[in-house]
Image (cartoon, rainbow, N blue to C red):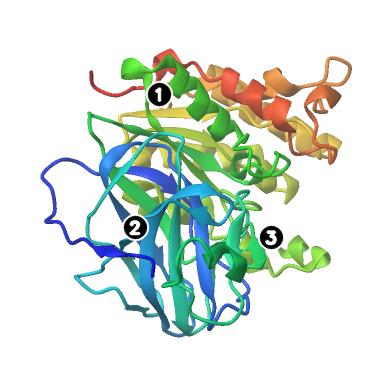
Amino acid sequence: MASIEPENKAEPKNNWVAAWYAPPLAVIAADLTGRTLRQIIRMQGGGSQIRVGLSNRYGQAPVTISSISAAHVLNGPNLHPGAKAVLFKGENTLTLHPGQEITSDPLELQVTVGSDIAITFYVKKGDCHTGHPVGLQTSYISKLGDFTKLPEEIAPAFYPLITTARWLISRVDVLPDSPLNAVVAFGSSVTDGVGSTLDAHRSWPGYLAQRLAKAGGTRLMSVINAGVSGNQLTNDNISELAAFGFPSFMAGEAGLKRLEWDLLAIPGATDLIVHIASNDLRMGVSSETIITALKEVADRTRQKYKKVFGATILPGGYTTEQNLERHRVNHWLLEESSPWYDAPFDFATALRSENDEALVDPTYDSGDGVHPNDRGYEQMAAAVNINLLSGSPG
């Protein structure tokens, strides 16, 4: 039988740092009751211990999960031996009540930057109404049954279904071996990575993480992706999603509403990059309203973040009037935002077409005229001056 070792460490005195994050959203419940989920997580920070954050923020009823464990990934659904039980106040079975969010007890598990771990649990009772639809990393769902105790050499055969969404898991923190800070990317679908290659980690936050890891030393930071596809800065939901068969709530709460429970609650975060409001423009929100909201973001997040950066809004997908409004917002970010933001990063110039500044350069376009491809996301990450980021103490 697979051995799952219980761990229940006392809360350490050192600071915890977020090493992976998926902002929780209201989602359409999948048929997960009575199945085992094995969700694959790419770690953006390393350390000697982890803790796991779960969320039933949008749940309509309690959800009970059991046999929660963490293990290193070998490949696909295959894990290295030595899965460890994830405990919540000493218990390995947990009922998440509607609206409840909880963080596990510390777990002794050495992880490194860029490594994958699997969080596995059995959905014993209830529907999962909280998750993150755009995970862009393959995870696994079992056939009906609790397969958490199977010997690892045969367990993968019992996970015939795949998903790229996240279910109930919202965060993994690390206790770093050396001082580590986190930089948070706040935005909508472009930050979420729509249009990038599945399982390749090529969103612009993903490429930024690669740059910081390559720079190493005090430049290394955990890069946290707080992108929500469809998200607006000033308004909840996008009613137009209904035309594509999705309920409007899947675009999430307005960015301004997310600040308190989302951005300000991420452990170890010192820097924030704000790249949001393209959907506001498409919904007819004025540049004046957007600029006022961007000022509010900076003012409110200063209570936590040492540095707050703005980023210009990409071209593509706007009417002539909306594009003029985009230019007004970008002009403010580049020329007038210094009382609020430490510096702007010019994503728009990095990706615009030389032939038509209202469009994304075809070299960087995923094909829909709105979302970049891998090369476009790499260009965006290259536009971030990493020397301006706080880095991590030496």
Who's the residue at 70% across and 32% down the image? 326
The kind of secondary structure element at disc 1 is: loop
Depth order, front residue of 138/321 = 138
Instruction: For label 1, count other residues whose C-alpha is less than 10 Å away and answer few (under 14), some (14-19) or many (20+).
Output: few
Going from N to C along the chain, the mark reached first, 2 or 1, is 2
Q: Position of residue 127 (x, y in %)?
A: 53, 81
Instruction: For label 2, count other residues whose C-alpha is less than 10 Å away and answer few (under 14), some (14-19) or many (20+).
Output: many
Looking at the picture, which amino acid does disc 2 mark? Val
Depth order, front residue of 156/358 = 156
Left/right placement of residue 190 relative to residue 171 reads right
Q: Position of residue 207 (x, y in %)?
A: 57, 28
Looking at the picture, which amino acid does disc 1 mark? Pro
Q: Which residue is mark 1?
A: 339
The kind of secondary structure element at disc 3 is: loop
Looking at the image, residue 361 lies above or below residue 305: above
In the image, which disc is placed on residue 52? 2
In the image, which disc is placed on residue 101? none
Looking at the image, residue 89 lies above or below residue 127: above
